Every structure is written in structure tokens, then in C-alpha cells.
Image (tube, rainbow, N blue to C red):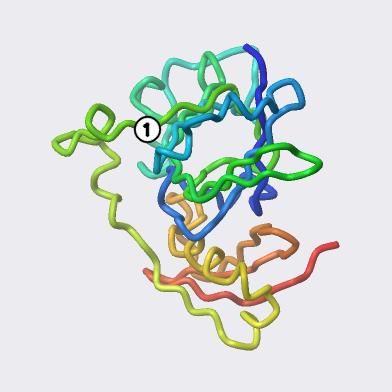
């Protein structure tokens, strides 16, 4: 398996990354191909597709052993299910699969042709093994059942972000940040309204508390 590209975005740590691809359409990511694969002919015709599949490496979850069962955070972190019934990063092979929207194709001087996508759930710098077109008539199954993931499909928090704190965030990143906070970055088994959480996003450290279905941003710090 060869790494053909890496993705770049504002997710600087695992905490806060959406639990599935497509949940935060506001956030844009850039796919930069490795020098060996910057031949523009390799992307000929890709502009005819609206969405793509990314096959990538769980680069922060590589381990020598594996467990046949895992504890998904959305089940409270205390119920075990089979690893192949989840999208847990802790797998025999650390491979991820994500569907993203192709927003633009840009020709650059230093990085060759890059892909701008939205809806990615990948950490900044994640290695990508392959890019494939999403084909609606075969890849979309409207009658699909999603197991334990179905009950939390519409789950979102109400985000309270006062103007004073929000103004510290670059205006081009504000909507992306709010959409990520709506998805509830916490592990679902943590439910302490007095606990303050910290999440790294772009060049910011975002601190917040969650009480019921409301997330309140408490502090914003600029990281160097």
C-alpha cells in the first residue's frame, strides 16, 4: 500500500473530529498528492463527480494487537460490540473510508493539482491510500439500516457562542467551528455539566461546557 496523498484541514487533534464524514459540510479540506502522483492525467474526468470516496490510514491508531470487540462512544463507552460492526479506528488494519463532497479542483505552482473537499472526518496530515468516485446509483442505498448509529443520526447540540468570543475566531472559520460543536465533541459517556472541555481547532483552543442539549463556549485562546 502506497500513500498517494495527505489531507490538510483545521483538525489538529482527534478530539472534536466529527464522528462520521459528511456531518460538517462547512469545513473545507485540501488533498495534496505526493510528488510521485502529481500527474494531472491521473485526475482527468474527476470534475464530473460531485462526491468522492477516500481510503485512508488511521495514522494515530496503529497498533500491533487488536481486539474482536470495541466500546463505541455513542453507546456510552461501556457496551462492547464486534469491531466489524463499528467504524472504530482500532482494527486489524488501520484503514478508514469516508465520503466527501468535491468542492473544487485547483492547480497550484508548488503542490500540483489539489482537491478541495468538504465533509471530511480526517485529522490534518492523514495519509490517503486512494481516491475513488462516489457513484450515486450503486453507492446510495436509501433503504439501508444503520444499526446502533441510527438513533443518533439527528443528534445535535444548541451552541451558545457569545459575540465577544466568536469575534476572536477568523470569520472564514466561524461557521465550520459552530457546525463541529453542534455534533458534540465529547465522549457520550461523559455528562458532567460543570466540566470544561478544551478542543483544538485551527490555531485556536476552544473551551466549552455542556448542560443537557446546550453547549456553551466559555473561552477562546489563540495558539501559536
Please state which of residues 143 and 59 is positioned toward the viewer in this rendering. 143
Residue at 54 percent across and 63 percent down: it is: 176
Query: At which x and y percent is residue 202?
Result: 70, 59
Q: Nearer the viewer, residue 72 or 191?
A: 72
Quarter of the picture holding the N terminus = top right
Q: Position of residue 165 (x, y in %)?
A: 65, 82
Looking at the image, residue 24 lies above or below residue 117: below
Q: Please determine whether, in this image, residue 106 is positioned above or below residue 156.
A: above
Few, some or many residues within 10 Å of mark 1 (<14, 14–19, 20+): some
Q: Is residue 190 above or below residue 165?
A: above
- At a point 38% along the width and 69% down the height, the residue shown is 212
SS under mark 1: loop
Q: How many marks?
A: 1
Q: Residue 87's x, y, as percent?
A: 42, 30
- Farthest residue in the right direction? 224
Q: Residue 150 is drawn in which quadrant?
A: top left
Q: Is residue 144 rendered to the left or right of residue 117? A: left
Q: Residue at x 68, y 73 (%)?
A: 170
User: According to the image, label 1 marks what residue?
Assistant: 134
Q: Quadrant of residue 169?
A: bottom right
| Residue 24 placement (x, y as % from top left) | 46, 55
* Position of residue 136 in the picture relative to residue 80 (left or right): left
Q: With 138 as the anchor, is 101 left or right in this view?
A: right
Q: Which residue is pictured at 63% across the width and 75% down the height?
A: 171
The C terminus, quarter of image: bottom right
Looking at the rendering, which quadrant does residue 115 occupy? top right
182 vs 21, nearest the viewer: 21
Residue located farthest toward the left when viewing the structure as drawn: 143
- Compared across the picture, whether 13 is left or right of 131 comes to right
Amino acid at each position: 500500500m502506497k500513500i498517494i496523498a495527505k489531507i490538510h484541514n483545521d483538525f489538529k487533534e482527534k478530539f472534536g473530529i466529527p464522528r462520521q464524514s459528511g456531518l460538517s459540510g462547512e469545513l473545507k479540506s485540501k488533498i495534496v498528492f505526493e510528488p510521485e502522483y502529481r500527474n494531472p492525467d491521473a485526475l482527468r474526468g474527476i470534475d464530473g463527480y460531485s462526491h468522492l470516496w477516500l481510503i485512508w490510514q488511521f495514522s494515530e491508531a496503529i497498533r500491533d494487537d487488536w481486539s474482536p470487540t470495541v466500546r463505541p462512544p455513542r453507546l456510552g463507552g461501556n457496551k462492547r460490540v464486534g469491531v466489524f460492526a463499528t467504524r472504530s479506528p482500532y482494527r486489524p488494519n488501520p484503514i478508514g473510508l469516508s465520503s466527501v463532497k468535491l468542492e473544487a479542483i485547483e492547480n497550484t505552482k508548488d503542490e500540483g493539482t489539489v482537491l478541495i473537499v468538504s465533509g471530511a472526518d480526517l485529522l490534518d496530515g492523514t495519509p490517503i491510500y486512494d481516491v475513488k468516485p462516489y457513484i450515486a446509483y450503486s453507492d446510495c442505498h436509501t433503504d439501508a439500516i444503520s444499526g446502533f448509529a441510527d438513533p443518533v443520526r439527528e443528534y445535535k447540540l444548541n451552541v451558545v457562542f457569545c459575540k465577544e468570543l466568536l469575534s476572536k475566531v477568523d470569520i472564514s472559520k466561524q461557521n465550520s467551528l459552530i457546525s463541529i460543536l453542534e455534533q458534540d465533541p465529547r465522549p457520550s459517556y461523559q455528562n458532567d455539566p460543570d466540566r470544561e472541555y478544551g478542543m483544538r481547532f485551527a490555531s485556536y483552543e476552544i473551551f466549552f461546557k455542556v448542560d443537557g442539549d446546550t453547549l456553551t463556549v466559555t473561552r477562546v485562546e489563540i495558539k501559536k
